[in-house]
Each structure stands twice: as structure tokens, then as C-alpha cells.
Amino acid sequence: MSSSPLSKKRRLSGTETKTGSHCSSSNSVRTDLSHTPANGMAKNGNDAEIDEGLYSRQLYVLGHAAMKRMQNSNVLISGMRGLGVEIAKNVILGGVKSVAVHDQGVAEWRDLSSQFYLREEDLGKNRAEVSQHRLAELNNYVSVTAYTETLTEDFMTKFQVVVLTNSTLEEQHQLGEICHNKGVKLIVADTRGLFGQIFCDFGVDMVVYDPNGEQPLSAMISMITKDSSGVVTCLDETRHGFESGDYVTFTEVKGMIELNGCQPVEIKVLGPYTFSICDTTGFTDYLRGGIVSQVKMPKKISFKSISSSIAEPEFLLTDFAKFERPGQLHVGFQAIHAFQKKHNHLPAPWSQADGDEFLALAKEVNSAQTGSAKVEQLDDALIKKLSFVAAGDLAPINAFIGGLAAQEVLKACTGKFMPIMQWLYFDALECLAEEEGVELTEEECAPRNCRYDGQVAVFGTKLQELLAKQRYFLVGAGAIGCELLKNFAMIGLAGGKGEVIVTDMDTIEKSNLNRQFLFRPSDVTKMKSDTAAAAVKLMNPSIRITGHQNRVGPDTERVYDDDFFESLDGVTNALDNVDARMYMDRRCVYYRKPLLESGTLGTKGNVQVVIPFLTESYSSSQDPPEKSIPICTLKNFPNAIEHTLQWARDEFEGLFKQPPENAMQYLSDPKFMERTLKLPGAQPVEVLEAVYKSLVTDCPHSWADCVAWARNHWQCQYSNNIRQLLHNFPPEQLTSSGAPFWSGPKRCPHGLDFSTSNELHMDYVVAAANLFAQTYGLKGSTDRAGVVKILQEVKVPPFSPRSGVKIHVSDQELQNSNSSVDDCRLDELKVQIPSPESSNFKLCAIDFEKDDDTNFHMDFIVASSNLRAENYDIPPTDRHKSKLIAGKIIPAIATTTSAVVGLVCLELIKIVQGHKKLESFKNGFMNLALPFFAFSEPIAAPTHKYYEIDWTLWARFEVTGVQPNGEEMTLQQFLDYFKNEHKLEITMLSQGVSMLYSFFMPGAKLKERLDLPMTEIVTKVSKKKLGKHVKALVFELCCNDQTEEDVEVPYVRYTIR
């Protein structure tokens, strides 16, 4: 279960990709796989190939060009406390050329609360030196060195990017000026207890190549006017999505050909389907067609140095509900530096005396401001809270600020995405006690020389005791799961009598190593949950953690039963699919347990907190359904590479998965024929035809037969079927209204001629023949010369288009056509298919696997899709982008995961403390590319009503099935109970998918059921025995009130044990 999708549906977001250059014909692409050297190590730098196996998910976020720029970047990170190590971890996983970690300080007790690469035996040792070798293990491609001297100009100018953490204001100014003058990009990041700060200075002429990372938009054109500002109208199938100020270019325009391949033109949006461009009066008249595509234009932005920006700050708001806060904290952070300079230490945790002095200092700092940094009125309570917690060091805050700062490093290296302009402040004061005026004492928060000192400074010892006792269930040990476990270990969750149970049924793959930072190359093929559990035990030996390998779902309810869930304090999801999320959500609602839900999609991330009796649940809101591609578009009228890739995926399933499955079912299941004949419409003929082909006509006996099959299938798909389509709808065909049939979204295709000298044609035959051979258990081959030899002997039957072949133009037409059943053919097939007894061979269905480059799966998809693209003159795409779309890959990057999980753990701290107010909790959404942040209080659980009783999704009727006399309630008694106790007449009663009772049930059936115990009815109707682990059943009710009106009511929890 890897990093989770942001939304509830799996969405795709493309990124910049480069088309391969090995063209075998004008429109086909072939890509060669690059391999790392035999020793598994490769150097980042100018000549370095990108290891797509390792970086694949991140490449879909950043693209190849940005990744190349990163591989030439050297980064210095100063300060190896919790924040510094978090930034270093994310930057190293990202894959820069080198990282130097700098620190002159030694490990102290308070560092252990968030510095996950320091251990108790490292106390007193230099933080950079201890961290260096543990950081170096994260990525073999990145050189990691430790530096313990004072930072000098000569040393700093060796780097493209410098990050300062845990630095004084004097250092920030002095080193900041050096960086600004020498063209070195600077990031200052700092965390103080529940507060965080980031400053960026990327020089006076920073170039941003892509401000948002979204896939460039394109639209089909229906009209272009001749005007001083020509108006372009797009087809009204979908909105164009452009914004004024975007740049576009044109292709395939008929008539006004001057626009084709023109320099990017700035547009002004006039409406959802129209926009204006340049002067078109001198152009040829527009005839038809054309595609308009957005062009990402480089943008120059200028930064001020820290010295000039500190007086005239520009703030990026992280929380719209805290509009005034950045200005206040800008002064507050300067006051921290002033206090530290004066006393050589930070304000003591929760010290009233230090708080008063700190407030006075902050007022002095404010009155000394000359520019816009001066605030009218300091918020005394806020500034004092900053003083109280400034000595704290919290892992979740470091994770959030560290994720953001690391993303800024990547922006500085690559020019991909918009940087923070220029100051960002963040706080999580909602984590403190909810009651007004409740303050901790200095004594409760004083250091104790223990690993949680940095956290005790903020929350005192009581929270630490509560955390140690927690029993939490973590579902998933992928990217989000690894980050959660690291934070759990740092904050001390289950550090005493509690326990963390983590389950994940996946094994570790190479592509996981780029963001699932608890895993190393030597862990590949091991179980994720066990490996992650062992890794966090090293970070904090006192964490009690157990790894499971179970999928969550109805199948594992014997393991995760009533006793298991009732013993939990909460659940955190780290899942990668909606179904499992919805299932866990239902379980948490039923057992009334808090649920922390989060997900990422590239640079986007979200956090949702579900609190029993307070908030709505994860399932309360749904994403709109994803738009599917119409069948007729896929079958006959594709106009985009997404269509040809989906067609190729369907081909894969229809050739190598479904036919062998059906054939094996026919051979092994005596009832297969009976079931098949009951299928609707023409399906029985289609299924049996496929079985007949698998067992008789297509059944190969040698490798040569497989090659011949692949060659003939190529002919059918890329030549014959296209010729038949053009026979039905010739290129010059007009519609009934006189418009060209082949126009708008319908692209006129052309058939292909097979050639053994065309690499793409050979790619297809080799991949298809090998996959076909696999399904029959025959040995394949990659010997191309041998394949060419076989092909020379293959006889391809001649083809002439036939009249009378019906091709549907729209899905509506397809639905309306009654597919008649050919009974004669059905009878023929029943006789012709060999009996199961007479067939002794075994077929093997192939499940699509995108990440194995040796299994021919992606080879087939890429060749199949690009050949079809060539048929329709659609620009082809490379293997990398094909894998993204066909494999439905979720783009992912470590920075977003780190930041999202930081926010999740802040919510966890609130839950453990027992926060009760809706406004204390924060659902969060972020897009680090823009950068954009939005926090909101969770939505309250919606209220329903029957009679005068209000209820929410957390409510239920509790019914004890076993009565005082030891006998179980019958259905009649159950119905009477609701009538007498709740004045509700049950009209329908169900359990899962089983209908137990309804008012329209036949009399005899009803009479029989009324006197039966409830559990007996359940087992009878569902035809399933109740497991011994089941303590209670869930019944759904439809009821009428006393006025016979239908009323909505909660579900019933019917206790049987």
C-alpha cells in the first residue's frame, strides 16, 4: 500500500515527458531501457542516466528535464537537528548530485525528540558526523558528506543551494548576503515548538519553467474568425480550461494554415469555449479542424536578500483563518533571536518571567522596525505562547516545515514550480489545551534528560504518559505509512504499555525506495510491515510495534474482530485505494474510533480527521465519478494518446487474460457451459467463440505458431479493421447535414503496411508472440533475427472489405442496436468445442504488471498503442508516459508525504489529549507546487430527525438479542420491540445484502419467519454460518412512524454474545 491518492477516486496527473528519439517511422516511437552499471551505483551529473526504476513515481511529478537539473545540483544543509535531518532526508531521496550536512553542535537529549538518525549512544557526538552515514544509505546516487567547520564564503559558493536551520539572525544576514551576491540560492528554515518559519531568496533573476506542474491543456477547434483579435471557438464537448495570459500554439488547422506551428500566442479568455488571439485579418480563411495546445512559458522572478526583505516582508499565507498571524510571528521570531543573543539560551518552557521579558523584547523589536514589517498592535497572548514553547522541538512540525523546505530546495535546483515568495509562517496552537487560560507549569515542562525533552517542553509530561499507553492500528506501510511510523516513534506513541499494529500485504519493490525511506536496496522483496517495524525500533527502541501482512476487508474480520477494534484508541490510514479507505471508515464509524485519513497526488496532499460523534466520516462526501472514454471512441474514433493506451490495455486483457481464464473454466468447471448459456444477448456466442479459438483455431504448438498468430493479429488490427472502417465511412464521406464525417473529434485513419525493418512493428510481434506463448506454457524468444526468419514464412490471408458490416458511430447507437443471438452458430460451437475430458493442456491467464521491464507487458502496451496512434495520426508517446496512463500510476514525491504526515500527527496529538471542540481540529489541503495551503475545521456530522429525536451517522439502536430467560429474540419480538419502545413500525429489515423481512413478503414465508430467532433467519437467508468471532450483527431498517410516514432511522447493533 504505497502513497495514497489525494482524492477518493484514483486520479491521474501527467507531467512533462520527452518523446523518444528512436523513430522508426514518421509517427512511431521506440524507447530503449537504460540500465544502471553492474555494480548498481551510478554517479549523478551531466552524463548520468536517470534510473527510472528508482525514480519512476517522482519523474511523473517533476519530469525528465527537471530531474536532470537536479542531478547536477550540490546542496548544503546547515544544522542537523530534527528539522535539518528532515530536509536532508527528503532532498537526498529526491536525487540531487550531492548533499553536505553541516553542524558544529553535539547531540543533546532534546534532539532525540525529532532527530530520527540520532540514538542515545550518540549523545555528545557531532550531529552532522553521526547523521552522515545514515543519510547516505537513503540513495546510492547521492554523495553525502559531513562538514563541521565554520561556514565560509569559499565553501558556500561550491553549492547551488544553501539551507540554514538552527542558525542565528546574524548568520542568516551575513551568509544571506554572500548567497545573494554570489548567485547561490538560499533557504532559511526554523521551527520553535508549535511554530515554523521558511524564507527563500533565489536571486534577482530566477527562472521558473513550469509554475504549476499540471499537464498542458489542449482543445479541438470548431471556428476561428478573421479579426484584429481573432476569436477561437472550441468544440463544445468540454470547456477549454485556459486562463487569460496563457500562451498557446496550433496544429492541424485547415485553411488558416498560418497558425500551424506558430510561435506561442498570448490569449484572452472570452468564455468557457472561446478566447481571442492575435490579429488574424491577414490570414487565409479558416476551413475546419485544428488543435490548440497550451505552452508553458518560462517566467522570471526576482527575490530580495534577507536583509532587505526582513524589513519589507512578503508573506505566503498558510491559513486564511489566521490572516494577521504572519506579521506577528515575523516580529516574534526576531524576538527569539534577540532573547537568545541576550541570554545565550531560549526562553524557558512555560516560564512566566521569561514570557514577560520576551514580550517586552518583542515590543522593542517591533518599534525598531522601519518598513512594513512593523505591526500596529502586537498580540500579547500569541507572543507569550511563542515564548512558552520556543524551546520545544516537535517531530510533526519538523516533518511539515521540512517537507516544504525540501520542496523549495528542489524548486531552486530545477526551476520547476513556483517558489515561496518569500516568507512563510505556520503554527499549530490548536494542539495546546482547549480551555481558555489553562497553562502548564515550568516544572511540568522542565527537561528531564530523556528522549522526549523537546516535546515535554511544549506539552508537559502528562501527554507523554498518555501517548505511551495508546494502541493504534496503522493500515499500510508504504510512503505515508513509513513517515507515520517515524513520527510515532519520535513522539513516543506506544512507547510504554501501548502498541502500534501495522498491516500491509505488499513486498518492497525498487520503485518504493525513492520515498518509502525506511527501506533499503537490500530490503527489496521483503515484507513492508515487518521491515518498517524493525527500522523504527532502531529509531526508538521503546516503541511497541507488531507487523501484520493482512489485507483489510471482510476476509480478515476474524483477525480484526470486535475484540481487536474495541481495544484500539484510534486508526490511521496509509492506503492507496478508495475501497479500502471506505471499508476502514465504516469500521471506525461502527466501533466509534477516531480515524486519521490522508493522501497525496504528486505535490498535492490532504488530511482529514474523523472524530466519533463530532465530525462527518470519510464516506460522507464523494468525488464526482471519473469521466470514462466512450466505447465507440475507443473502438473506432480515438483522438488522443489516452484513447489508444486504454485500447491497448483492453487488448491485453482480451488476448492474454480473459480467453485463457474462460478456457480453463470450461475445462475445469462442469457448470461453466450452463452458466454461459444463461448470459444475456450475444454474450454466450462471444464467450464460446473465444473458448473455441483458444482450444482449437488459435491453439499454438510451437514458437513459430505464436509468431504467426502475432503477425496475423497485427494485420487484423492495424490494416484490415482500418480498411473496413474506411470502406464503411470513406475519407470524403458527408453527414446528413452535409458536414464532413471525418472532422471534429473524428480523425480519419489510414491502414499500415507491415515491415520487418520497422522497429515498432517488430516490437509488437515479439511482445505479442511471447505473451501468447506464455498463456500456453510454450517457451518464447527475444531473438529478432529468428523472428524475422519465421515471419518470412508466415502466410497472411488477403483481405477485402465486406459490405453489410455494421459499425456504430455513437454509444447511444450501440445501446439501441439489438444484438441478435445466432442460435445456429451457438449449436455449432457446442458441438465443435472439444469436451473437457479430451483436452489435457493447461492455459495460464496473465495479470498485467507494469513495473517489470522484462515481462513484455509494457512492451506490448507501448507498441500496441503507438501503432494505433500511427493509424490515426495521433502523436505517439514514450514508454514512461505510457506506463503512467496505462498503469494508472499515482505520481508521488517524498516532500509532500513528509508534510502531509506532519499534519496528520498534529491531529493525532489533539485526539490523544481528548480535544472535543470541532474548531480545534483541522482538515488540510496543500499543493506544494503553487504553493497553496488551505485549512478548515472538519464538517460536523449531519443531523437527521425522527419524532423529536436528532441523530447522526454515529448513532444506532442497541438491541440485546439474548433475553433474560436465555432465549434469543424472534423476528416477531424484534418487530414488537421497535413498535413498543420506539413507536416505529418496521417495513423492511435487512442484514448486508440479505432481506430478512418486508411488508410485501408472501404470507407463508412471513409466517414461517416470524417465530424464528433472528440469527437463524440470518444464516438461512445469507446461506452463511456466523463465525465465533461475531459478537453483534448490523441490521438496516426502513420504518414508518405513527402517522404512517416513512422516516429515516439509525442502524441496529444487535448483540448476540
Image (cartoon, rainbow, N blue to C red):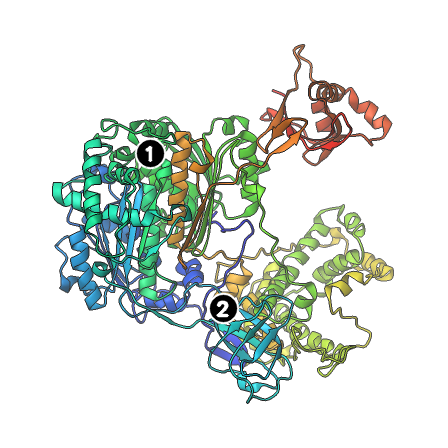
- The quadrant in which residue 96 appears is bottom left
For residue 147, say whether it is visible.
Answer: no
Q: Amino acid at mark 2?
A: Pro
Q: In this rendering, is residue 289 above or below 142? A: below
**What residue is shown with label 2?**
216
**Circle 2 sits in a helix, a strand or a loop, which is it?**
loop
**Circle 1 sits in a helix, a strand or a loop, which is it?**
loop
497, 335: nearer the viewer: 335
For residue 911, say whether it is visible.
Answer: yes
Q: Position of residue 142 (x, y in %)?
A: 29, 59
Q: Amino acid at mark 1?
A: Gly
At x 61% / y 30%, what residue is drawn?
951
- The quadrant in which residue 973 appears is top right
Q: Position of residue 82 (x, y in %)?
A: 27, 45
**What residue is shown with label 1?**
492
* CA distance separating discs 1 and 2: 45 Å
Q: Position of residue 396 (x, y in %)?
A: 34, 42
Q: Position of residue 457 (x, y in %)?
A: 26, 34
At x 69% / y 17%, what residue is drawn?
968
Are the residues flagged by discs 1 and 2 in contact, CB closer than 8 Å? no
